[in-house]
Image (cartoon, rainbow, N blue to C red):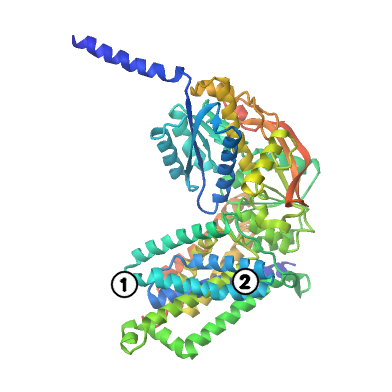
C-alpha cells in the first residue's frame, strides 16, 4: 500500500499549492524598504510619511483589504537591503515589496523579490539595467528611469541653443549615467566635464576652475548634501547672477529647506512638482502639509502613487493577490496619479511628461515652480533593449 | 591669467588645510597624550556646526552664535570624556574604536532627533559675504580669508600654550611619560579632561566655520574625519607641528590635484583617458601620499619626540 500513501501525500501537497492564489485574499501585506537612518534618512522620511498618508486616504485598506505595511531600513547598503527584503518575503510573507531609493540597492533587492514570485515596485530608483536587458515581468516602477530627468534638461538646453556648458557630477556610476543622459539630447559645445569625489564637501577648487573657463551655463547632478554645499558655495562665490545654474535631482523639496534663498534662480527638470495642477496632486500636497508640516518632494509623491497603484490593481482583481494578475492590472495605470495621466511602456517604466521648474520665492518660502513642459509622454532610452 | 588661477587654487588649498588643521590639532593631542583613538571627533565638529547655526538663528548674530557654540561644544566634549571615554583609557585601541564608533551613531541620531534630518541652514552675514580683490582679477571670498586668518591665529595660540605655558609643559610631559607625571602629583585625569575638552572646542571651531559653507546635517563629520586621520598620520601622531604641516600638505595636494591633475595628465596621455583617470587619481592622491610617508617615515614627518 506504500505507493498509494505516497500518492495521497503528493496529491494533498499539490492541492495545497493549487488552492493558495486562486482565492481572493482578505489581507494584503506590503513590505516598504527605504533608507530611514543616516544622512539620507530624510529622503526615507518623505517616502514613509507619504505611504502613511496614502493609507490614511484609503481608510487603512489597500484594495478594500485589511492592510499591513512593514517598513524596512536598508541603511543605504545593498547587502542590508537584500537581507531586509528576504526577511520580509520569508518571515512576514509580504505580497509586494515596494520602495528603494538607491539604484545599487534596488539591483541587489529586485532579483530576490522577483525570483520569489512576488512583485517588486520601485518608488524611486530606476537603473538602466532593469529598464533594458534585465527587465522583468514582475518588476514595475512608479517613478522614472534614471536618465529621463537629465535627458529633459539636455533637451531644454539644446532647444535654447546653449553652447559652452560646464558639467559637474560625482565620480560614480549614476553620475556618469546622468551626464550620458544629458548628452543624449544636448548636442552643443561642452566647456568641460568634471567628476568630483562622491560625498565631497568643498567645491571651491572646482568653482575657481569653472570661473576661469567662462562657460555660458552650468549643469550639475549633485544629489543630497553635495547639492546643498555646491549650490551654497556657487551663490557665495558670486556666480549666481553671472552664469545660470541648471541641475537634476539636486534642488528639490528635500534640500530646499537647507538652501532657502541660495537656491533662488535655480533650474531643475522633474516629472512632478508640488505646484502641479491636478486634483490628486493638490489633495496629496495639501493633506501632506497639514499632517506633517513640510512640503513633500517627488520621492514622496511617487511613493504615494505606488500605494494608490497597488490599491487600484487589487480592486480590479477583486482581491486576487496573484503576482501576474496584479501586474496586468497595474500596467493599466488606471488610478488618479499625482502626476496626472500616464501609461506604462513594455519595460514597466512610466511614459510620462517632464517639466522645467525654477526656484522662486513664494508663499511657502522658496519653492519650485513649473515653467514649461519639456517632454510629453517621454519614453526612456533603454525600453528597446527589453524583450517584453 | 593662468598664474591668477594657480594663486587662487593655492589659497583654496591653504583654506582647506587650515580647516583640517583645526580638526587635526584636537585629534592628535588626544591621540598622542591620552593614547585614545577617538573616531567621534567628527561628531564634535558636527555638534559645533549645529550649535553655531542654532545660536546664530536664535541671536541673529553670527559672532554671538560662534562665541556661544565654542563653550557649548567644550562642555559636550567634557561630558563625553567623563561619561563615556574615561573607562576606555586602559583598554586596547580596538575597544576604543568600537566605543567611539558607537558614539558617532549616537550623535548622528541624537542630532536628527533634536534638529531633524533635513539639516540646518545658515547664510553668511552681509558683512562677511563680500569678496576682496587681492590682485587685479583675483577676487577671493572674504569669509574664506577669515578662515585662513583664524586658523593661523589658533595655530600660534596653540604653539604658545604648548611650548610656553605651564599647562603646555604638563601636556608635553603627559605625552612623554604619563606614569611619571602622575607620580609627581599631577592630577592626570583632570589634565586629560582639559585636553579632551579643548580638543572638542577646536573641532567645534572647525564646525562653526564650516556651517555657512557646508551642509549642516547628520553625519557631516565622517567625511572630513577620514582626511583628518590622513593628516595626523602624515604629520606624526601627537605633534601639533606635524598636524599643521600635514594639514597644509593634505589641503594643498588635494586641492591642486582636483584642479590641475586632469589638464596635466592630458599633456601626457590622451584627453579621454585623462578624463577618466584624472578624477580617480585626484581623489586617491592624499592616500597615496600617506602610503609613501608611511613607507619612508613610519613615524610621520614631524614625530613627537620622547615617545
Q: Position of residue B251 (x, y in %)?
A: 57, 69
Residue found 64% across the figure and 24% down from its top: A334
> What whole-number distance in Å separates the C-alpha atoms at marks 1 and 2?
37 Å
* Res A290 → quadrant: top right
SS for tag 2?
helix
| Mark count | 2
Residue to which mark 1 is pinned: B90
**Residue at the image point whose x is 33% and y is 89% from the top:** B185
Q: Tell me residue A136's x, y (percent).
A: 52, 28
Rendering quarter of residue B190:
bottom left
Assign a secondary structure to mark 1.
Answer: loop
Question: Nearest the camera: A358 or B305?
Answer: A358
Label 1: how many Cα within 10 Å (few below 14, some 14–19, many 20+): few
Q: Is residue A69 above or below residue B213?
A: above
Residue B130 point in image, percent of width and height? 75, 70
Residue B77 shows up from this direction = yes
Callouts 1 and 2 on one subunit = yes
- Name which quarter of the figure residue B129 lies in: bottom right
Q: Residues within 10 Å of mark 2 (few under 14, many from 20)?
A: many
Question: Is residue B297 something that shows in the picture?
Answer: no
Q: Which residue is at a point 48% across and 45% down the rendered structure image?
A: A73
Asked whether the beta carbons under mark 1 and mark 2 sit within 8 Å of each other, the answer is no
Q: Chain of mark 2?
A: B
- Assign the N terminus of chain A to one quadrant of the image: top left
In-image side of A100 versus B189 (left or right): right
Q: Which residue is mark 2?
A: B15
Please report, as a chain letter, where disc 1 is located: B
Nearer the N terminus, badge 1 or badge 2? 2
- Vertically, is B273 above or below B161? above
For the C terminus of chain A, the quadrant is top right
Amino acid at each position: 500500500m506504500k505507493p498509494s500513501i505516497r500518492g495521497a501525500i503528493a496529491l494533498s501537497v499539490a492541492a495545497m499549492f493549487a488552492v493558495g492564489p486562486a482565492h481572493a485574499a482578505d489581507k494584503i501585506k506590503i513590505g516598504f524598504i527605504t533608507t530611514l537612518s543616516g544622512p539620507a534618512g530624510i529622503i526615507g522620511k518623505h517616502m514613509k510619511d507619504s505611504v502613511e498618508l496614502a493609507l490614511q486616504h484609503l481608510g487603512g485598506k489597500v484594495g478594500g483589504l485589511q492592510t499591513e505595511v512593514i517598513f524596512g531600513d536598508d541603511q543605504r547598503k545593498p547587502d542590508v537591503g537584500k537581507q531586509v527584503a528576504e526577511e520580509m518575503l520569508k518571515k512576514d510573507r509580504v505580497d509586494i515589496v515596494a520602495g528603494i531609493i538607491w539604484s545599487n540597492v534596488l539591483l541587489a533587492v529586485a532579483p530576490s523579490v522577483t525570483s520569489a514570485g512576488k512583485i517588486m515596485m520601485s518608488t524611486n530608483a530606476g537603473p538602466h539595467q532593469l529598464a533594458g536587458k534585465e527587465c522583468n515581468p514582475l518588476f514595475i516602477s512608479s517613478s522614472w528611469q534614471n536618465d529621463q530627468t537629465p535627458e529633459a534638461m539636455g533637451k531644454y538646453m539644446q532647444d535654447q541653443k546653449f553652447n559652452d556648458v560646464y558639467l559637474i557630477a560625482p565620480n560614480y556610476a549614476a553620475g556618469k549615467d546622468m551626464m550620458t543622459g544629458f548628452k543624449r539630447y544636448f548636442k552643443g559645445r561642452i566647456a568641460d566635464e568634471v567628476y568630483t569625489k562622491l560625498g565631497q564637501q568643498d567645491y571651491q577648487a572646482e568653482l575657481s576652475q569653472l570661473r576661469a573657463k567662462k562657460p555660458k551655463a552650468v549643469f550639475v547632478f549633485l544629489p543630497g548634501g553635495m547639492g546643498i554645499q555646491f549650490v551654497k558655495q556657487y551663490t557665495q562665490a558670486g556666480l549666481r547672477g553671472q552664469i545660470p545654474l541648471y541641475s537634476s535631482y539636486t534642488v528639490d523639496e528635500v534640500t530646499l529647506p537647507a538652501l532657502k534663498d541660495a537656491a533662488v534662480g535655480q533650474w531643475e527638470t522633474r516629472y512632478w512638482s508640488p505646484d502641479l495642477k491636478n486634483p490628486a496632486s493638490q489633495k496629496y500636497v495639501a493633506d501632506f502639509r497639514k499632517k506633517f508640516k513640510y512640503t513633500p518632494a517627488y520621492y514622496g509623491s511617487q511613493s504615494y502613487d505606488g500605494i494608490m497603484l497597488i490599491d487600484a490593481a487589487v480592486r480590479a482583481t477583486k482581491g486576487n493577490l496573484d503576482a501576474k494578475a496584479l501586474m496586468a492590472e497595474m500596467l493599466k495605470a488606471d488610478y488618479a496619479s499625482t502626476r496626472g495621466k500616464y501609461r506604462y511602456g513594455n519595460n514597466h517604466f512610466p511614459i510620462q511628461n517632464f517639466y522645467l521648474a525654477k526656484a522662486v520665492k513664494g508663499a511657502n518660502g522658496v519653492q519650485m515652480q513649473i515653467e514649461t513642459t519639456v517632454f510629453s509622454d517621454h519614453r526612456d532610452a533603454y525600453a528597446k533593449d527589453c524583450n517584453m | 591669467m593662468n598664474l591668477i588661477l594657480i594663486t587662487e587654487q593655492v589659497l583654496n588649498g591653504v583654506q582647506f588645510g587650515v580647516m583640517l588643521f583645526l580638526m587635526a590639532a584636537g585629534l592628535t593631542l588626544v591621540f598622542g597624550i591620552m593614547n585614545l583613538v577617538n573616531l567621534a571627533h567628527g561628531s564634535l565638529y558636527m555638534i559645533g556646526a549645529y550649535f553655531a547655526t542654532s545660536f546664530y538663528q536664535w541671536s541673529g548674530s553670527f559672532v554671538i552664535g560662534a562665541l556661544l557654540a565654542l563653550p557649548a561644544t567644550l562642555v559636550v566634549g567634557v561630558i563625553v570624556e567623563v561619561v563615556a571615554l574615561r573607562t576606555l583609557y586602559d583598554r586596547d585601541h580596538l575597544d576604543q574604536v568600537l566605543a567611539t564608533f558607537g558614539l558617532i551613531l549616537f550623535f548622528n541620531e541624537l542630532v536628527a532627533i533634536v534638529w531633524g534630518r533635513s539639516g540646518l541652514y545658515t547664510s553668511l552675514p552681509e558683512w562677511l559675504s563680500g569678496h576682496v580683490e587681492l590682485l587685479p582679477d583675483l577676487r577671493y571670498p572674504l569669509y574664506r580669508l577669515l578662515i585662513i586668518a583664524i586658523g593661523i591665529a589658533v595655530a600660534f595660540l596653540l604653539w604658545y600654550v604648548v611650548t610656553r605655558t605651564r599647562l603646555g609643559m604638563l601636556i608635553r610631559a603627559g605625552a612623554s611619560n604619563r606614569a611619571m607625571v602622575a607620580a609627581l602629583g599631577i592630577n592626570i585625569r583632570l589634565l586629560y579632561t582639559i585636553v579632551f575638552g579643548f580638543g572638542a572646542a577646536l573641532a567645534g571651531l572647525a564646525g562653526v566655520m564650516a556651517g555657512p559653507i557646508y551642509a549642516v546635517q547628520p553625519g557631516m563629520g565622517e567625511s572630513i574625519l577620514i582626511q583628518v586621520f590622513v593628516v595626523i598620520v602624515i604629520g606624526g601622531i601627537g605633534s601639533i607641528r606635524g598636524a599643521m604641516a600635514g594639514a597644509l600638505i593634505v589641503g594643498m595636494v588635494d586641492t591642486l590635484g582636483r584642479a590641475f591633475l586632469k589638464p596635466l595628465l592630458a599633456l601626457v596621455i590622451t584627453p579621454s583617458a585623462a578624463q577618466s583617470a584624472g578624477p580617480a587619481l585626484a581623489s586617491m592622491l592624499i592616500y597615496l601620499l600617506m602610503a609613501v610617508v608611511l613607507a619612508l617615515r613610519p613615524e610621520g614627518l614631524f614625530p613627537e619626540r620622547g615617545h
